[in-house]
Image: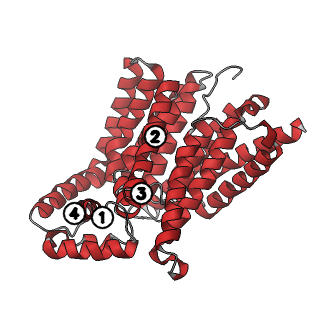
Amino acid sequence: MEKIEQRLYFVSFLLAISAIVLTLMMTSRQRELFYFSFYIAMIGLFVERKNIRLPKMDISYAIILIGLVKIIWTLVLYRHMPDYGLAGPQLDSGKKLIVGGVLVFYLNYFSHYLTTFNYRQYLLTGFALAFVLATGYGIYQVYHSIERIDFSTNRATVAAYIYSTLSILLVYLLIKLKKNTSYYVAAAAVIIISFLIVIMTGTRAAVLAHLFLMLLMILFHFRRIHLKPILIVLVLLGLVGMATYSKYIKPKIEQTSEEIMLYQKGDDLSSLGSRFSLWKVGFDIFLQHPFGNTVEARYAQAAEIIAKAPQNKTALTYINVHLHDELLEAASLQGVVGLLTVFFFYGYITMKSLVDKNTPLLMIGCCMIVYGLTDVLLTSPESVIFYLVCIALFKKQISTKNC
């Protein structure tokens, strides 16, 4: 019986890693592997039901809570509407959050099975393969003159955030599981290549945050500064920056400056201007309706606000999609309850990683918080699966024994 339990755990673990590998390559396959991993986890939980003693608190509870709030919100406010109106993305993400929460619980509650196979090598191989495939696909898109690398997501912003997080976790694995100097060389190469690809996604938030998050990961892991390798990497990154400055970086700087200037003059018809408008209108909606809204009601309320403040008119074009901010999206739809559940998740994953000195879990949390300022990672299908699987794989501290 124990061999069956071990094999169930191994299969679920392997399917979860496979979902990471295909995240930026084949999003439909990513979703299938995620659910298959969950189905195996459910079988494993049933088989081992007598051995389960629920902990008082766990990060999986925080994840499931967000999912429950989204589902309950949909079922209550859209109960009289066919196909739940415009609440489909919220309902879908709620389901994924509950599924992901169960997977996080299973893979970590029975993590003693990790000692039965070389899970460290599987992690490194999986994340390295995911990085190589995604990078190759990104270069392919550049070669075919695609304006912004978006991999298979069709959204360059979400693609950049996932790729950035993937790269940071791969660098962590390389320096954590180092067997020789080549691992450090590979880590330096990943830092440089990932920065180049992130630049080519044209996603300003990722370009600004990627290297800072990478540096935070290295400092938290080593607890001290190794000046020589950092200087070498910085020099190489400087060369990358110089090589891409005129084609990628300079136009974005000029675009950002122009869009801020236009917004200050009352023109929000731009990428950054529309975000400013969405944030302003979304915050006003939350203040006026702190206990939640339907997506349709939010649109009507936005129209009323914009009638009095027409400088934010572009918000009306995009508000039915999302507000480009995780906290505002939850607050404007699920109200105070939704906002608090996301805050609780952010706080718990940060506190847990700091207390346990768990570097990858801290970086997953930091990436979700930082990139959640400009997007809705807990709603986007590709990103919610990616981040939930990462939490499931890294909540357990990685040991370097017998590497």
Disc with the residue nearer the chain's start (4 vs 1): 4
Please name the amino acid that badge 3 sits on: Val
Q: Residue at x 32, y 60 (%)?
A: 290
> Disc number at residue 365?
2
Kindly report which numbered mark, 2 or 4, lies closer to the viewer in this rendering: 2
Q: Name above or below for residue 23 compared with residue 91.
A: above
Q: Residue at x 65, y 42 (%)?
A: 105
Q: Position of residue 56 (x, y in %)?
A: 59, 35
Disc with the residue nearer the chain's start (2 vs 4): 4
Q: Name above or below for residue 176 compared with residue 167.
A: above
The residue at the far bottom in this view is: 82
Disc with the residue nearer the chain's start (2 vs 1): 1
Q: Residues within 10 Å of mark 1 (few under 14, many from 20)?
A: some
Disc 4 element: helix
> Disc number at residue 289?
1
Q: In the rendered structure, are the residues bearing label 2 and label 4 in contact, judged by CB atoms less than 8 Å apart? A: no
- Tell me the residue that label 4 is attached to: 273
